[in-house]
Amino acid sequence: MTDLTSTPSAYTGPRRILSGIQASGALHLGNYLGALKRFVALQGEGAPVFVFVADLHAITVWQEPDKLQAQTREIAAAYLASGLDPARSVIFPQSAVPAHAELAWIFNCVARLGWLDRMTQFKEKSGKHKERASVGLYTYPVLQAADILLYKATEVPVGDDQKQHLELTRDIAAKFNTDFNAPGFFPLPEPVIQGPATRVMSLRDGQAKMSKSDPSDQSRINLTDDADAITAKIKKARTDPEALPETVEALEGRPEARNLVSIYAALADQTPAEVLARFGGQGFGAFKPALAELAVEALAPVTAEMRRLMADPAEIDRTLARGAEQAAGIAEATVAEVKDLVGFWHRP
């Protein structure tokens, strides 16, 4: 796989940032800190930001159709409530731009089976019965490459668990550019991994990622939770009997403590070292109430705005329709260029 740090790109086009969240299950604190908060920060840097709801990715496993549509609106509401501005960012549903699927098919013919066989997420999600998994789950990373390269995105905010997929995207881009004698046609996108909580862990198990698919609602803080629910979940979060240490190094081997410190740091825009400088030597009886107060303060405005927006789906739909139209204009131009390079017939 391509090394994310060493392979140069001949691409000379404009800087563009792209990411998305899958439309399956309720959004939680991990999504907010690992994605939404970072999207808003990147929006302020001046480069175009494309943020989509990944509903095509969602159906790699079965989704109830009515629920899928509701979840698409909920994620769009979370984007807006977190501070994404439709005047500065393009917000749209993936399935509303057919070019995503069209480019994915072309990339299916560029990518190699050996590359996909090395994708660890498919092995984790399919488990012991991979023959029962959908073909879409297996080729998911190819569609993800199409999502990114369709807009010739140069930067992609990703969590640590998505770095392998971005490596595949770079491999596909490089092979396409070589196969069709088009150096620099597609960029080799760079990962944007920032902040102290790029991977927020479960409140019940500090070694498992916070997930909307976890059967225990106590494992996560949902963006729709009220102040009482947030406080109760943090109060019940799993910890160990030791006091917080005074150095980050001393958190080694204490995954639950490290997770809570990282969450506080991300919410407060501090480093874990700064958090421990304040709370080191104190027990969780003192730290958890402070964390709960901070979490409520940060999430309450987001929750309130999400609820307002979800009560007015027409407003969300207008935003998504406008974003889809903007995205389609760029996506269709890219696919037209790709078709010419591949040699497809087009109407004279």
Image: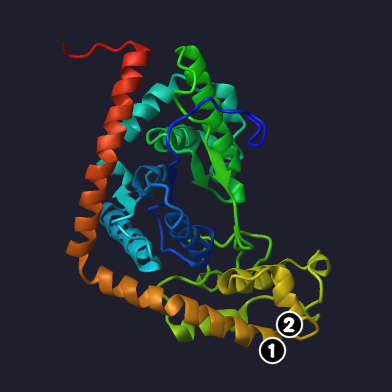
Identify the residue at horizontal 46%, vertical 70% (top origin): 222
Figure quadrant of residue 57: top left
Q: Position of residue 55 (x, y in %)?
A: 34, 47
177 to 56, vertically: above or below: above
Name the residue type under label 2: Phe
Q: Position of residue 252 (x, y in %)?
A: 81, 64
Q: CA distance from mark 1 to mark 2?
A: 8 Å
Callout 1: few (<14), some (14-19), or many (20+) C-alpha neighbours within 10 Å? Answer: few
Q: Position of residue 167 (x, y in %)?
A: 58, 34
| Dot 1 and dot 2 residues touching (CB under 8 Å) | yes
Numbered badge on residue 286: 1
Callout 2: few (<14), some (14-19), or many (20+) C-alpha neighbours within 10 Å? Answer: some
Q: Position of residue 92 (x, y in %)?
A: 30, 49
The reply, left or right, for residue 284 in relation to residue 177 is right
Which element carries disc 2, helix, strand or loop? helix
Identify the residue at horizontal 48%, vertical 23% (top origin): 184
The reply, left or right, for residue 324 in relation to residue 298 is left
Identify the residue at horizontal 21%, vertical 50% (top origin): 321
Name the residue type under label 1: Ala
223 to 98, vertically: above or below: below
Numbered badge on residue 279: 2
Q: Marks 1 and 2: which is nearer the front?
A: 2
Q: 32 or 56, which lies in front?
A: 32
Figure quadrant of residue 348: top left
Q: Earlier in the sequence, mark 1 or mark 2?
A: 2
Identify the residue at horizontal 34%, vertical 77% (top origin): 304
